[in-house]
Image: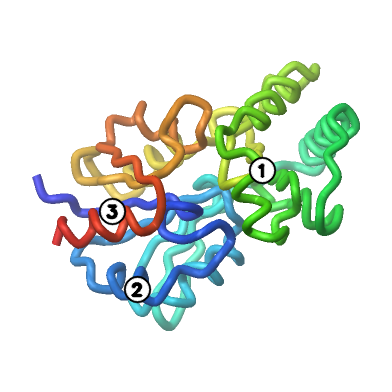
Amino acid sequence: MKYQFLVFDVDNTITESCSEITDEMAGILNKLREEIVFISGTHAFELKRMVSSKLNRKHHLLANVGTHYLLVYPDKEEEIYYETLDEEEKKEIILSLKKLKEEYKLLPLTSEEDQIQDGGSQITFSILGRNAPREMKESYDKDKEKRKKFVIFLGKIPGNEKYEFGIGGTTSIDITKKGNDKGTSLEKFMENHHLLRDELLFFGDQLSPGGNDYSVIKTGIKCIEVKNPEETMRILEKLQ
């Protein structure tokens, strides 16, 4: 069956962490016949900088693990829905992150504001700081073992059973309400567009258990695991 929608994780799938997509990647994405969707733990304003600024075609942005949906055209954008955490939930999550920081002495290389980002529907904890040097971020937790330990710690804090803690990017932990993961968000996206799972193909680099792409597998959507943007480009060129 020919796919109608190609769905992409962002960091380390179509671009290096926190970076704009390359001109080469943009050229390939702009030429795809299928509709294209980008789902990420990254906030919408960052996704627009990293992805939308390089594209000249309609595309779908599912920011904050899919809880913030923007339909983007070359000359305009439409907000389809935006699910947010309330202020008490945000305070509870940030307090938990402060406990984690104290327990493991997690100081950012940049600033406190750059380490904990409020995305409305998601809190992102960038351990070294979102804008820390890329080389240091890439070498910090390649096997994800540090963040797996941190997620276990956060999950044991009383009251945190109502939140999801997902490993994303190179140094991040994404925190959303329980049930707000990429798999659930893509099921909502399919329902919104009256799609069958066989009409979507997903690309991601975190499809192993504990990764923030893993939840997509349960939807039945066909998934392709990639190691980096270069591998994604090679696969896309073969699909055309």
Residue type of the residue flagged with mark 3 = Leu
Q: Which residue is mark 3?
A: 6
Q: Can you identify the residue that label 2 sits on?
A: 24
- The quarter of the image holding the N terminus is top left
Residue at point 74% right, 44% down?
Answer: 127
Name the N-terminal-most of marks 1 and 2. Answer: 2
Please report whichever mark, 1 or 3, sits nearer to the chain's N-terminal start.
3
| Disc 3 crowd, CA 10 A, few/some/many (<14, 14-19, 20+) | some
Q: Secondary structure at mark 3?
A: strand
Q: Quadrant of residue 214?
A: top left
Residue 175: where, in percent of width, then height? 66, 37
Q: Residues within 10 Å of mark 1 (few under 14, many from 20)?
A: some
Residue furthest to the right in view is 102
Q: Position of residue 88 (x, y in %)?
A: 82, 37
Closer to us: 225 or 89: 225
Query: Three-letter amino acid code at disc 1?
Result: Tyr
233 relative to 126, above or below: below
Q: Secondary structure at mark 1?
A: helix
Mark 3 vs mark 2: in front? 2
Q: Which residue is mark 1?
A: 140
Judged by depth in the image, the label closer to the viewer, 1 or 2, is: 1
Tag of residue 43: none
